Amino acid sequence: GAVVSQHPSWVICKSGTSVKIECRSLDFQATTMFWYRQFPKQSLMLMATSNEGSKATYEQGVEKDKFLINHASLTLSTLTVTSAHPEDSSFYICSARAERIHSYNEQFFGPGTRLTVL
Amino acid sequence: AQKVTQAQTEISVVEKEDVTLDCVYETRDTTYYLFWYKQPPSGELVFLIRRNSFDEQNEISGRYSWNFQKSTSSFNFTITASQVVDSAVYFCALMDGNFNKFYFGSGTKLNVKP
């Protein structure tokens, strides 16, 4: 149990286009999901917290108009990279917080999406 | 402020050697959680262990062991008799007591050579 999927697993797009990445909790409901970005050979940096039914909370320095987050249901959050540029090329990882599956609200990570912008 | 420091950027060992990955954390919370994740070249994070701030008991799982010491704010990870399959980037992470954000260290790349 507690599986999180991401789609697509990798995507290549042209500069200026928009790309949508989906994060799904497959066997549990997640009112809160998180989006991380990882540049090559670097650590994971939290971009935003996605809350079902409300606006996402963005970390300092993350452009909310460029990285659109929609948490449409208790099992799905999407991240749309608008007008992507080569500097947006990165590994994007989501995590979903399971409400009290165990004794605390554990987070489970998706497998990641590798975005390459040409 | 929450912070995790992994001072070792990269470590290379020969198979069957023991290796310890260091992790030092900073937090003002009394309740917090510490984690270790393995990230192989595929990129997917593999959960290894979680420890809460009230449980300083060391843990052993097969070839893996963890040493949690609140007095030095450290949560070190030891692999005994390393294997080539252990080659990966290992991340130490801290989570606040409200189960919100992960604070990841910069990661330690482990190379295990045959």
Image (cartoon, coloured by chain):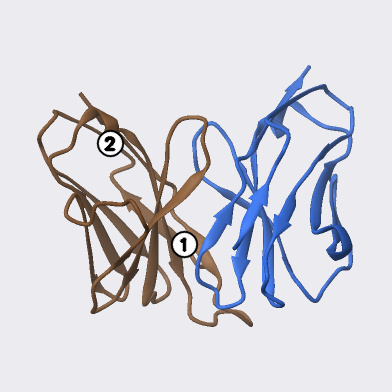
Chain colours: A brown, B blue
Q: Which marked residue is nearer to the observer: mark 1 or mark 2?
A: 2
Quadrant into which the N terminus of chain B falls: bottom right
- Where residue A20 sits: x, y (%)? 19, 49
- Where residue B83 sits: x, y (%)? 79, 29
Dot 1 and dot 2 within a common chain: yes
Q: Is residue B56 above or below residue B65?
A: below
Q: Secondary structure at mark 2?
A: helix
Q: Is residue B69 left or right of residue A61?
A: right
Q: Is residue B111 above or below residue B54?
A: above
Cα separation between marks 1 and 2? 27 Å
Q: Is residue B47 above or below residue A116?
A: below
Label 2 belongs to which residue?
Answer: A88
Residue drawn at x 39%, y 77% as measured from the top left: A29
Residue drawn at x 83%, y 23% as measured from the top left: B15
Sequence-wise, the earlier of marks 1 and 2 is: 1
Label 1 belongs to which residue?
Answer: A3
Quadrant into which the C terminus of chain B falls: top right
Q: Secondary structure at mark 1?
A: loop
Residue drawn at x 89%, y 33% as measured from the top left: B18
Which quadrant would residue B22 be assigned to in this image? top right
